[in-house]
Image (spheres, rainbow, N blue to C red):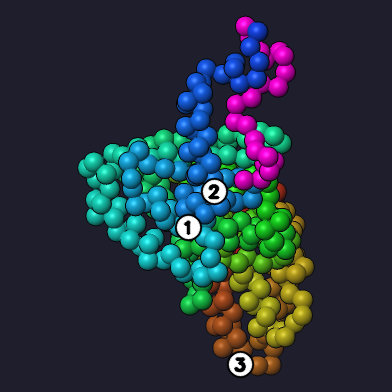
Amino acid sequence: MGAQTSGANIVSFNLDAFNSYAKSQGANAPVSQAAAFAYTTALNALLARDSVQRVQVGDASTVFWAQTPEPMEDWLAQLIGGGTDDPDAHTQQVKALFDAVRSGGFGGTRGATKFYVLGLAPNAARIAVRFWHAAPLAEIAQRVVNWFEDLRMARGPNDAEFPSLFRLLTAVAVQNKADNIPPRLGGDIVRSLFMGTPYPAHWLQAAVQRCRAERQVNRLRAAAIKACLNRAGHTKGIDSQQPWEMKEMLDPDNPSPGYRLGRLFAALEKIQEEASPGLNTTIRERYYGAASSTPVAAFTTLMRLKNHHLAKLNKGTVEPGEAAGRDRGRHQRLPISSQPSRPGPLRHRLLPPAARFLYQA
C-alpha cells in the first residue's frame, strides 16, 4: 500500500518518552500477541494485491468487510474505484444496487448487518489510520447510491453512466495524469462517501482550477462541481447560503448569480460565434478566467462586445424588422437579471459561486 517493502507498523513506540513501566516497543500497547496476530493477518489479507475488498487511490487504501459474509464485499471496490478500461463494466451492478435499495433489498437482518470501513495511508515505517467507520449495511448501501446520484449528469452516447473514482480524480489532475492527483484527495472523498459528510473542499477547488486553466468544463469536472455543491447544500457545508440544488441539465429557474452569469457567458459566446464564424480566439479564451473571478470588470466589457457582435450579425443580412425581432429573441434567451451592473457580492467571485459559473458556462 505504499509503505516500506519490509512492512509497516500500525502501533509503535519509537521514543523512550512514549514508554511506561519499563516496557519497550509494542509491549506498551494493551493488545495481546494473539489479538495482534489476528488483526495483522486479517489486514494483510484485505490489503493483498488480489483483494476484492480494497480500493486503492493514490497513496490511500480503503478496505471494508461485513460482520457476516455479504455479496456486497465482492463488488463494492470495483463499483467505486473502477480499475478497468471499460467505463460501463459495472453499470448493471450499480443499477441492481439502486433497485435493491429502493425495493427494500437491504431490509431486515441483512440491512442490520454491521459493515466496517477502514482508511489507511503510508507514513514512512508506519501506517496512518485516515478514518474508521462502522454502520449498518443498509446505511452503507444508501450512501453508495447517494454517491452515484450526486454524480449523475446528462451524458452523450459514449460517456460512462457511472464514472469511477479514478476517472473523476484524473479529471481534476494536471494533464489528466494519475501521478498528478492531489495528495489525500482520494482518501478524503472515500471518507465522505461512506460517512455521508460534505465532499472535501479541495476537490471542488481542484475542479475549478482545472476548468480555469484549460478553459474547458468536461463532464467529469462538471459532475465533481455538482456533487460538491449539492452535498454541501444538503449538509450545510461550504456553501450553506445557496441551498438551490444543481441539476444534471440546464435549469432556467436557478436563481444563483454565479449560475446565471455562466448562462449569460455561454449565450454571449454563442452570439460571437454566429457573428464571426471560424474565429480562432473567442471570449472563452480571453475572458473565461476573469469572468469567473471578477465578473463586474469582465462582464462590463463583454456586454459592450455583445452589442458589436449583434450589429455585425444583423448588418446587411436581414431586413430591419426581421433583425429587430431576431435581436429581441436573443435578448429573451439571455438571463438578463444576472447582469453584473447590480451592486453586491458579484464584484469578486468566491469559490462556490465561481463553481456554479463554470458549471454552466
Which residue lies at the image location 38% right of the left edge and 37% below the top edge? 135
- Residue furthest to the left: 108
Check if residue 252 falls in the magenta segment.
no
* Labels 1 & 2 near each other (Cβ < 8 A): no
Whether 168 is drawn above or below 123: the answer is: below
Q: 320 or 230, which lies in front?
A: 230
Q: Circle 2 sits in a helix, a strand or a loop, which is it? A: loop
Q: CA distance from mark 1 to mark 2?
A: 15 Å
Q: 91 or 226, which lies in front?
A: 91
Quadrant in the picture for the N terminus: top right
Q: Circle 1 sits in a helix, a strand or a loop, which is it? A: helix
Query: Mark 3 sits on what residue?
Result: 319
- Mark positioned earlier in the residue sequence (1 or 2): 2
Residues rendered magenta in the picture? 1-21
* Labels 2 & 3 near each other (Cβ < 8 A): no
Q: Position of residue 287 (x, y in %)?
A: 74, 65
Whether 277 is drawn above or below 196: the answer is: below
Identify the amino acid type marked 1. Answer: Gln
Identify the amino acid type marked 3. Answer: Glu
Query: Mark 1 sits on what residue?
Result: 78
Between tags 1 and 3, which lies in front? 1
Identify the amino acid type marked 2. Answer: Ala
